[in-house]
Amino acid sequence: MDLTLIVVLVIALALFFDFTNGFHDTANAMATPIATGAMRPKVAVALAAVLNLIGAFLSTEVAKTISGGIIKEGDGGVQITPVLIFAGLVGAIVWNMITWLYGLPSSSSHALFGGLIGAAIVGAGLQSVDFVVVLDKVILPAIIAPFTAGVVAWSATKLAYWITRRYDGRPDGRGGFRYGQIFSSSLVALSHGTNDAQKTMGVITLTLISAGFQEAGSGPEGWVVIACALAIAIGTYSGGWRIIRTLGRGLTEVKPAQGFAAETSTAATILASSHLGFALSTTQVASGSVIGSGLGRRGSSVRWGTAGRIAIGWLLTLPSAAIVGAVAGLLANLGPIGVVIDTVVGTAVVVYIFWRARRNRVSSENAVKPLPVQGRSEVAASGKVVKIEKVKPLKKERRRRESA
């Protein structure tokens, strides 16, 4: 297959992955403000899309980690081919779609890394992967960052409720924090753009380097930054309501003070990691923050069953995406026919998942509201059970009888 054609195909697939990353990870920034009523759902995702777009232009450190760190390339290293990068993207996209279907906030980042690592090992051997960088920049942050964000969110929630303790007993749970959530969730969306959009920039840059169209060790070109920023912004605007439901209601009942604390902790952790070049999972950080805030509010409870499902998704993401990427890599090594098979099978899986999702549709209307009961909400349905009649006052009834 012509080298230029496969490079164009890889770039198109990478941008589609960036799109899935956007709607998969919208919940990281906007699940809690939607759940607390700080912002209307469609306004929230629109704001997140704009800030993801802006954030993508603020840094390229994470992109350099991917383009010249995890997979060895250039002088002194094994040069991964565009065909193998294509196979790795297939693995990442398939796993992203599967976890989206089940509403699991898994890591798009780890799906991408897993797919690339699996394809590289199959096509170029174990020596093509720099496992020191994987450990230092991917695995250790994946272990440390969610725990750190959770502790910070727990502390921030405790502090918020202590400062506002004179409002104990208010049913709205410190409703004034809703205004603060607009700022804190915006900061999360901005930080998400600085970290996650760069991962696709790094993949495209790695492809251009491996094809000889760009010098080894160089950063992403301007057009790559713009294309990736637009792709993740469009994906973010499309929603990702299934995962918004899980993070907004599935882990714990989020109050405004909790949401503010969780979002601030998430943003601080992601921005610090982006500055250091850590290819962090924003999903893991956001989930850790929500759990920490749930533990920090007295009387709140964490749904550990849901948390366990999410944790299993975290553990399975990198190896599962690696397996799919490895299988796709084996097929891709067959030549043009293998690339065609990968494309057809991958497209079929994505189309089937979208079709399956329509059977149990989650949208902005029902993402954080009770599910309908026979066409009506649970409250509306229960209202039909009990009929309340107005009772006339006793004095009026007595006068009516006397006049009769």
Image: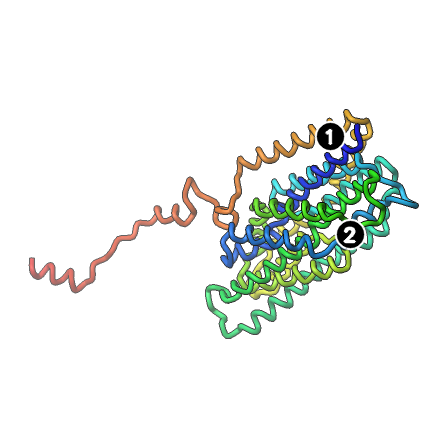
Determine which quarter of the picture holds residue 151: bottom right
Residue 315 is at least partly visible in this image = no
Distance of mark 2 from mark 1, alpha carbons? Answer: 27 Å
Residue carrying label 1: 342
Q: Is residue 188 above or below residue 86?
A: below
Looking at the image, residue 206 sits to the left or right of residue 194; the answer is right
Q: Secondary structure at mark 1?
A: helix
Task: Give, as a three-letter code, the residue at label 1.
Answer: Asp
User: Count the marks: how many?
Assistant: 2
Task: Give, as a three-letter code, the residue at label 2.
Answer: Val
- For disc 1, the neighbor class at 10 Å (few under 14, some 14 to 19, many from 20) is many
Residue mark closest to the camera, 2 vs 1: 1
Residue 123 is at least partly visible in this image = yes
Determine which quarter of the picture holds residue 84: top right
Looking at the image, residue 1 sits to the left or right of residue 304; the answer is right
Tell me which label, 2 or 1, sits earlier in the chain.
2
Q: Is residue 283 above or below residue 330?
A: below
Where is residue 145 shown, x and y percent of the image?
72, 58
Q: Residue at x 53, y 65 (%)?
A: 177
- For disc 2, the neighbor class at 10 Å (few under 14, some 14 to 19, many from 20) is many
Residue carrying label 2: 138
